Amino acid sequence: MERDILQRGYEVKANETKLIRIIEGTNQYLVPHFQRPYTWQRKNWDTLWADVEALLGGEAPSETPREHFMGAIVTAPAHSVPEGVTKYLLIDGQQRLTTLLTMLAAIRDRARLLDDQKLANRIHELYLTNRYQDGLDQYKLLPTQGNEPQHNDRSAFMRIVDAEEQAHPGSALHTAYQHFARLLKPTTVERVNALANAVLAHVLLVSIVLERDDNPYAIFESLNAKGQPLSQSDLVRNFFFMSIDSSRHDHIYSTKWTPMERAIGRENMETYIRHFLIRRGTVVKEADVYFALKTEVEDRGREHAEPMLDELVKFSQHYVKFIDASREHSTDIRERLVRLQRLRATVCYPFLLNVFEDRASGKMTDREAIDILDVIENFVVRRYVCGTIRAELNEVFTALYRNASRFTRLGEGVREVLGSRNYPLDEEFFENLQTRKLYAVGEARDRARLILERLEECRAGKERVGTDNLTIEHIMPQTLTDWWREHLGPSVDETYELYLHTIGNLTLTAYNAELSNADFPKKAELLRESRLTLNSELPELSRWTREEIELRAKSLAERALEVWPNFAPHASARRHRAVRGTTPKRVVVLGEAFEVKSWQDVLRVTLTQLMLLGTEVIDQLLVEFPKNIRRSGTGLTAPKALSSELYYEGHLNAEQIYRLCSQIVQQVGLSSGEWHVDNE
């Protein structure tokens, strides 16, 4: 271990020394709160006991015991108010030192039972406690302080040192003490003295003392190379406790760090700290969270470590609402936070930290915050429907507060900034919502349901129907029966592939099990009982083909323009794109323009250029569009070759080609700026 640290270029004081030299004098070793709890078990205790007994050379105490090397302990001077006790942070070796002192306590208590008060007092006053010191300073070692009795190593150890009968039954330290006490029961006065001498004077440790300003990140990385690596949030916690006066550790741990970690959730801490740092307008990578925070604190000065922690705690009170919206008191804001959660719009959380802090400090009203949340939802939904690049969104939201704050009102600035960041205008949003495959697995499915719920709310009026028990229903079912195949006609496969998961074919219902793969007349009759406006027109229809799906998609897209209206200050009004009867002149793929003469050319050029993205993209298209793209021409009505191993369906009209191309580029992840068609 010493070699590992030296290889990293640290100035260390490393000495091989006896245990007695480490614990004698008025010293105290603090196991930082960031360390893991005591974990040694019986096999470890038995190994240590056997090693100590071996030092004595058998049953008869040896006059010249051998020596036993137990490894290293790594310490660093603790930041503390000058006192009579010299304090060190026990960075590594806590399991060894805690076990050795627990064994010494058991030896002390055995000596008392054998009426050897001299040995008992010597161990207690010189090696377990700091004589003449009060409070916590009297203990040589202060282990970690957990939140539950069975994990509270500090309390258990203090009770052992104080010779209290019950040292938190169930705790590992209590069990260790009892184990050593049982092993000591048959020993005589002479052997107890020999064991004490062996532990104190013949157990050797390498004591590595780090300099006060050593880099804790690299140290902990070195020390944990063989164990579970520390997370970025672990390292941040370590840094705070190593930077703040040790006398305040208990208070900070119990009143600041622990409540914050419980509220946020340990699994969310790393992301929260990253978002906390990003809120200032600087991109912070996931792997750089610790270094970014450390740099910010050191730029201010180490004395600002606790104020920085206070700031972290303060903003966490806003962040918990992003994770659990039920903690927000305003019903209107709570509803909007839930929607952003369902959209997985975590990219906006750093910006919202600033918004909620402005709100908490009185700089912003609830109404203004609601307005900003609506704009963000609008932006995220439109970008999602039209295709987006997440890295670009990170950059947009990272700088949003700084850029929007330049305007008189923050809400006005948010509209101006987001409206100029590839904000999809009405025409683009209107078209993409009709053609996009909204229904998919995982997160995409929840987004699809949210969009449908919002479209329902748009026309529901004051008497809203609860949607908690509703699920997404495919009107044309996911599994086609013979009835459906006959009903959809000759182009059944193309209709199924291009329209199944689009918004025109999706609705919400509580009758999912009853509807299932039923024919359309039965579905229409069941949906007659529905009170949802999404389903109000379906019972009046006699058929459900691509024409009906397209008409419903347009109707719902019109609603979407009401739910998420264009907020870009200088955006042009929507223009309906007519595909049928037009002649395309140019198709833009991946930002490069290609002259075309027909819609067939648009499809061929689009597929040809996407092939250049690699086999992974090709494989993806083969899975998602098996009726239109295949490895061979077999099964295609009018196969056209892109290569010797890739064919596409050539028997498609202009509208079918536009829909297929739109879905293909959406599947690949291209935005409208990277693919679009210019007509005559």
Image: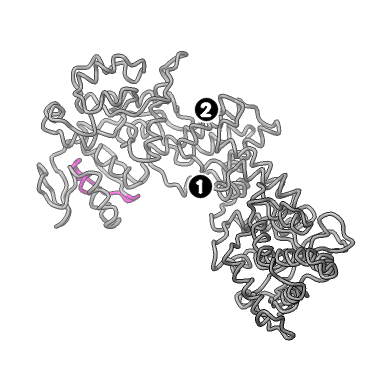
**Is 586 on the left-hand or right-hand side of 286?**
left
Give the residue displayed 37% in from the left and 33% down from the top. 448
Residue 491: horizontal and vertical position, in percent? 14, 33
Q: What is the x, y in percent for residue 614?
A: 28, 57
Q: Residues within 10 Å of mark 2 (few under 14, many from 20)?
A: some
First reached walking from the N terminus: tag 2 or tag 1? 2
Q: Secondary structure at mark 1?
A: helix
Determine which quarter of the picture holds residue 673.
top left
Residue situated in front as seen by the camera: 385 or 500? 500
Residue stretch in magenta: 590-606
Residue, x 72% and y 74% (percent of image)? 195
Q: Which residue is mark 2?
A: 335
- Amino acid at pointer 1: Asn
Q: Crowding at label 1, few (<14), some or many (≥20) Cα neighbours within 10 Å?
A: some
Which type of secondary structure does the marked residue at label 2 adopt?
Answer: helix
Judging by the rendered image, the residue that carries numbered circle 1 is: 394
Residue 335, above or below 142: above
